[in-house]
Amino acid sequence: MPDALSLSWRQYRLERKMFWRNPSAAFFNFLLPLLFLAGAGAILSGSQRDLDKLLPSIAGMSVMSTTFTALAYNIVFLRERGVLKRIRGTPLPTGSYFGGVAANAVTNTALQIAIVVLAGRVFFNIGWPPHVATLVVFVLVGVVCFAALGVAFAHVIPNFESTAAYVNAVFLPIVFVSFFVFDSTSAPGFLKTIADALPLKPLIEGLSGAMVAGAHSPSHLDALAVIGLWGAFGLYFAIRGFSWEQSRT
Amino acid sequence: MMPTVSETSPAIEVRSLCKRYGDYEAVRGIDISVRRGEVFGLLGPNGAGKTTTVEILEGYRARTSGEVSVLGHDPAKRSFELRRRIGIVLQSGGIYSHITPREALRHWASFYPHPREVEEVLALAGLTEKADERSRRLSGGQLRRLDFALALIGDPELIFLDEPTTGFDPEARRAAWETIRSLRALGKTILLTTHYLDEAQELADRVAIVKDGRILAIGPPRELSPHPPGAAHYRVAYRDAGGELIEHETDDPTTLLAELTREALARGERLEELSVARPTLEDVYLELTAASSGDRDA
């Protein structure tokens, strides 16, 4: 019988297989941010400054959609379908299960970031990321933060039918506020305060410094602290509130 | 707890089990002992506490009070050792939409120290032809067979079946019964819940009738009686010369039959359609559950 680590690897491979077999999930994970990038890129193509702002914004959104959105959907679906409960009744260690699930999300994020970086180089005249190590650190911290928040948020969603409404009610406002404040030099003060307190804008700023040569970025440590705090908050509720089965009404 | 773990000790031992949800008492003092190799049925209406009891034994729920031993373990501790030795068919358990039965069984097999062969389990569950079909394209009956197969892949000693045939058409039920019989033939201990009388009668070596969180009667289905032991009722029925159906209830069918046949012979008549029957499980069930009805069925 395999040990916990190879069980995690097996779970990861299963998650990968299931991911690619579900075209709509693959669409939301990969195509949507890329369409966004292509559409906005076409509109902004006249201004290199705008393109320099666009690329890390889309990268940040990709981190959020491949972790927060994808995990909230998955967990709610698997919980409602009874898959989680079934797994709970087997000797598969909980850590092996979540290890595989998390590694799957990390893979999607990494693929997505690679595609965004490549698109930036090929279409938007933005070179290879100047600070690869910083990029890796921010992507990893962002993944942990938004994955934990996604699992925690899944606990709030009552059923699968309402998942899209719940997820978008959080995802879209955060994306818009963060994009707007990150891009604008004249954003109202209260919006700036909100965006600075949420984890996405600090992530985008960190990614900006890492991905775009010469980009001005504020303190990485401040950004990592905000993302880290949200991550700790997410992890606490992800673990504490986790439910393996649909609550019976 | 019960410390001894041997081949002869009971597979499941439950004493004074209680489970309370807030103010509602789902299980109110259940005692059962399931022998190894036995098919034990928990029979009762919806809301009787069957699933709560089984899910406590499976380790899904914590009990409020009482003693529980499953293969010598306390299931509330959720030890790997215990979970490797049991198989669970939930009342409704889902599976990934895009997985095939063969892939699911291979994956599940990796959780266990000594799994059965995937092909063998596919055959046993009647899934060989659908082994490479995505689960979303399987019928309800085929998905249920996959539930059986996944519960079986780890070669468990003890299998929990929670309402295994609810919602099945008659043909699918027969097929599921065949699978359960073949599990019994493999020497597995099976704890089965059902609200179908014929299912309990067909499959179970012993049945406990459960209602409102209590056991009303317990024993082999054909020996169950709503009356005290020794006072078992027999029903003697026949058609008289006028074609009318006559029924007698008696504790002493020997004497009654002797009288009836002697009188009939004296009249030169035959007792058409003469039968002597013990009360069926259905009679017992209806009598017992009717006697305690009036409580809410929740």
Image (cartoon, helix red, strand yellow):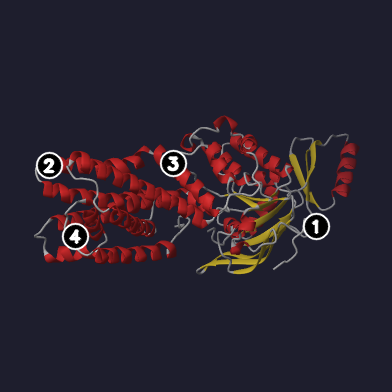
Q: Earlier in the sequence, mark 3 or mark 2?
A: 3
Q: Earlier in the sequence, mark 3 or mark 4?
A: 3
Q: Tell me the residue at 66%/62% (across/down).
A: B73
- Do dots 3 and 4 share one subunit? yes
Answer few, some or many: residues within 10 Å of disc 1's Cα (few below 14, many 20 plus, some between 14 and 19).
Answer: few
Per the image, label 4 sits on a secondary structure element best described as loop
Above or below: residue B161 compared with residue B10: above
Report the number of discs. 4
Q: Can residue A36 be seen by looking at this rendering?
A: no
Q: Tell me the residue at 64%/66% (across/down).
A: B17
Q: Which residue is mark 1?
A: B231
Q: Is residue B55 left or right of residue A58?
A: right
- Mark 2 chain: A
Tell me which amino acid carries mark 1: Ala
Per the image, label 2 sits on a secondary structure element best described as loop
The alpha-carbon separation of the residues under discs 3 and 2 comes to 37 Å
- Mark 1 chain: B
Q: Which one is nearer the viewer's eye here, B139 or A236?
A: A236
Q: Nearer the viewer, mark 1 or mark 3?
A: 3
Q: Which residue is mark 4?
A: A217
Q: Which residue is mark 3?
A: A18
Q: Which residue is mark 2?
A: A45
Q: Nearer the viewer, mark 1 or mark 4?
A: 4
Q: Which one is nearer the viewer's eye here, A204 or B44?
A: A204
- Do dots 3 and 2 share one subunit? yes
Residue B234's spot in the image, x, y percent? 79, 49
Q: Which one is nearer the viewer's eye here, B223 or A214?
A: A214
- Mark 4 chain: A
The alpha-carbon separation of the residues under discs 2 and 4 comes to 22 Å
- Locate residue A183: give its quadrant: bottom left
Per the image, label 3 sits on a secondary structure element best described as helix
Per the image, label 1 sits on a secondary structure element best described as loop
